[in-house]
Image (spheres, helix red, strand yellow):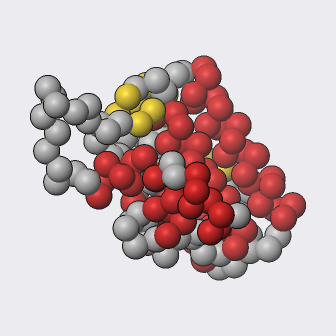
Amino acid sequence: MVMEYCPSMDLFTYVAEQATVGDEPLCHALFLQIVNTLNYMHETHKMAHLDIKLENIVVDEHYLLRLIDFAYCERVDARMHISKGTERYFAPEVARIFYERQVWYPNSLIEKPSYIAEKADVFSIGILLFTMFFGTPPFRQNDPQREPLLHYLCSNDLATAEIFF
């Protein structure tokens, strides 16, 4: 695969320089490009990226974004049983698999935990938007056992919702 050269910087560097923090119009313009790119991948090519993060998006001199690093791509409807991507951007169902990877699931007794690739991409862009606007990720750690809100998201426990909402 050959891609164009993008001499500027990745979105991580751009956010680290505080260029997007609190700038709602800029975040909106950049995020819209990301959503359109992801929609194109999902709808036209039926592929999920599975490693969407600031470091995998480059910004050119005209503020046009390019999604890079397609190493973890899978079909959008793929039911995944292994975690792919970068821990900070994991969807709760991906994080659960990542942190429970030491658990043995005999096929005859219990179904292995899984997730749909396309949905994991959508959660990752939410993490990306939060980080772009606030300059920090929404979770200190992406470990459901150490991060109460993420634990809630992984648990599907509606009673716990009162703690956060």
Q: Is residue 21 visible?
A: yes
Residue 143 found in image quarter: bottom left
Q: Is residue 73 visible?
A: no
Quadrant in which the C terminus is drawn: bottom right
Residue depicted at 58% across the width and 52% down the height: 158
Residue 81 found in image quarter: top left
The relative height of residue 98 versus residue 44 in the rendered view (above or below) is: below
* Residue 152 point in image, percent of width and height: 51, 59
* Residue 163 point in image, percent of width and height: 62, 69
* Residue 14 point in image, percent of width and height: 64, 70
The relative height of residue 68 versus residue 132 in the rendered view (above or below) is: above
Observer-nearest of 37 and 96: 96
Observer-nearest of 86 and 99: 99
Residue depicted at 46% across the width and 23% down the height: 77
The relative height of residue 40 versus residue 28 in the rendered view (above or below) is: above
- The number of numbered badges drawn on the structure is 0
Residue at the limit of the structure toward the bottom, as seen here: 17
Residue at the limit of the structure toward the right, as seen here: 25
Residue depicted at 72% across the width and 51% down the height: 31
* Residue 132 point in image, percent of width and height: 67, 66
Quadrant in which the N terminus is drawn: top left
Observer-nearest of 3 and 129: 129
Q: Is residue 163 left or right of residue 24?
A: left
Residue depicted at 59% across the width and 43% down the height: 122
